[in-house]
Amino acid sequence: MKLWGYSLLLAAGLAALPAGASAADGVDVASFVKRDAFVDIKLSPTGEFYAASVPAENETMLVIFTREGMKMTGAFRLGKNNHVHDFHWVSPTRVLIGMAQKLGSRDQPQLTGEIYAMNANGTGIDVLVGYRVRGAGAGTRIQPKKVEEVAAFLVDDLPGDDKNVVISVQQFAADAYTRAERLDVYTGRRNQIAIAPVRNADFTTDHQGVVRFALGYGTDNVRKLFYRAGEGKDWQLLRSDAQGEGIDHPIGFSADDSIAYFRSEQPQGPDAIVAFDIANQTRKEILRDAVADPDRVIYRRNSNTPVGVFFADGVPRSEFFDKNSPEAKQYRSLEAAFKGEGVRITSETADGGLALLRSWSDRNPGDIFLYDNAKKHAAHVISRGSWVDPEKMAPVRPIRLKARDGLALSGLLTTPKDSSGKSLPMVVMPHGGPFGIQDVWQFDSDAQMLAQAGYAVLQLNYRGSAGYGRAFRLAGQRQWGGAMQNDLTDATRWAIEQGVADPARICLYGASYGGYASLMGVAKEPALYKCAAGYVGVYDLPMMHSTGDIQKAGSGETYLREWIGSKEETAKVSPTELAQQIKVPVFLAAGGEDQRAPIAHSEKMEKALRAAGVPVETLYYKTEGHGFYVDEHQREFYTRLLAFLSRSLGGRTAAPAGAAASTGAK
């Protein structure tokens, strides 16, 4: 394990940082901004190799190791702002790699649609599809790879075929139509096998690799699901979001391809798992939770046959369509062994003999175990954050409350370790997004850092968040500064009523939309909060219609109009227009290369606050994007944030640089 961890760090070019508890006189910021040892790890089909995506300062690379001896055999990286987004073993010795780019640590990765491949021994690195593909040169008639600017994504790795996969391909044009192609993973040769009848489509294949479903949307953002009976058959519209009842998301087929399974949005309440009998065109609901959406699908080994799902509302839990299935029994055994933690099989060998397990909790970033199915034995491989001592971290508990209009809300409450949990200074930390994002029960470095500073941390999945059904998400539509903001206010008052929060010591802190909500919170409720911190936030909503990266596509313009509001509407709920209502100190941080929330938002907010006589501090880095990458910039931001909060709430500040090294922490 030590060799593996050391090799990963060496491969990524990362320097070892001090281990992770707080120093006696302050919080060890460095241990909380230290990058995870890996993002994802997968076992090869024969169990001979591990492949792992490893984060560096502003990129993510892929490394391959032998399972026996932990010898690194290959590495792949593209440089600054390029990130390995996903990867798949498509044969015992070949990996397909999907790429993304992002300019800041808080960015959602922008998928480039490039597909690269590499052999397990580090040879055969090639770009198969994408804008960086180059031709074979003048005078060469045979061009195995198409030279075209397209975005491609893996649809089906075709488990019985080590040479080919099915991919989706879309032109680099706003809201283009999508085609399905068969890709040779060695030569890059592509052959078209289907064209979607709808723009921006995702495909679903059956067990024979035949494309059967296409789900997409046009510039109107109306989602449509099409079905076809087989190769070369006509597409039929199966369901449309225009009907007002939501859409079906295909998730796989039964082993004989007679039943298709959907994650089906409902008019009210959480999504359901539905079995669709293809011959009879009939639907049957087979699994639905009373509160939460299915979070992740569990598949039978080496197939696209779904057998169960995970729910992420609180401590993760699994549910199965057949409670007596081998998969259900296996998970019951694993969940008993890892009681109180989340546990998930992330990859398996083709014969099912070995599997990689991931376990995690609110106080542990996660561990990877190699599980021998025959011996029922799990051996530790690596920790995501070996410098974190779970025993010194703060507990996180799921909470439920009612909004003022009766809507049920869920969230998370972190309280400092060994505290009474009562009359605490509190930081309300709204998530970014805001739509389709969910705060889930897991290790959150920001929340844990704030807890070590002595604060309770409240994270609310306000209306519009993911995880609680279509109607809950739609309830946030055009509610920036409205009902979504009221939810945060109601949750704050709930924490006061529960005796958790000291009503005289509460602040707001968030990033992106969370920065907006923090500034709107102190504008709408100047007597409730003592300060607000906004990190890479948006504060002038009309500006979103003319700057940033959302409005560039037709569907993006529709999104802004339908989900946020017109320029005239949003001006009324822009913090830049409400600075006179803010009566407490504000801290703003932003990056000059931010395309999602351009720094102009923060600069305009700062100017409005100064004109209103509001105390404001700023931290701007012209070379950073939507969230800071550079280690020293991250440390400076969190050091400044803790000092800012301390002046209003009285919590601990950051330890002096190097002080944590003397703590003797794990």
Image (cartoon, helix red, strand yellow):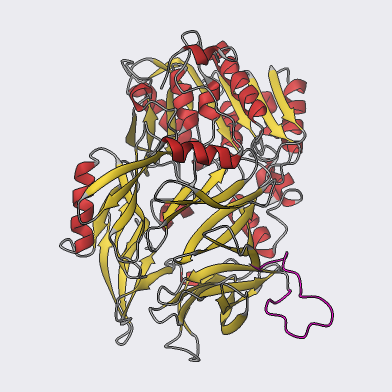
Q: Residue 337's x, y, as percent?
A: 21, 42
Is residue 130 shown in magenta?
yes
Residue closest to the eye, 645 or 252: 252
173 in relation to 317, above or below: below
- Give the farthest residue toward the top: 25
| In the image: residue 28, left or right of residue 307 | right
- Give the farthest residue toward the left: 324
Q: Quadrant of the N terminus?
A: top left
| In the image: residue 51, left or right of residue 639 | left
51 in relation to 246, above or below: above
Q: Main secondary structure of the magenta part?
A: loop
Magenta segment range?
128-147
Residue pictured at 42% horizontal, 46% vertical: 69
Residue closest to the eye, 207 or 44: 44
8 in relation to 191, above or below: above
Question: How many marks can you see?
Answer: 0
Residue pictured at 52% horizontal, 56% vertical: 86
Q: Residue 351's x, y, as percent?
A: 30, 66
Q: Residue 392's x, y, as percent?
A: 37, 21
Which quadrant would residue 111 be assigned to in this image? Answer: bottom right
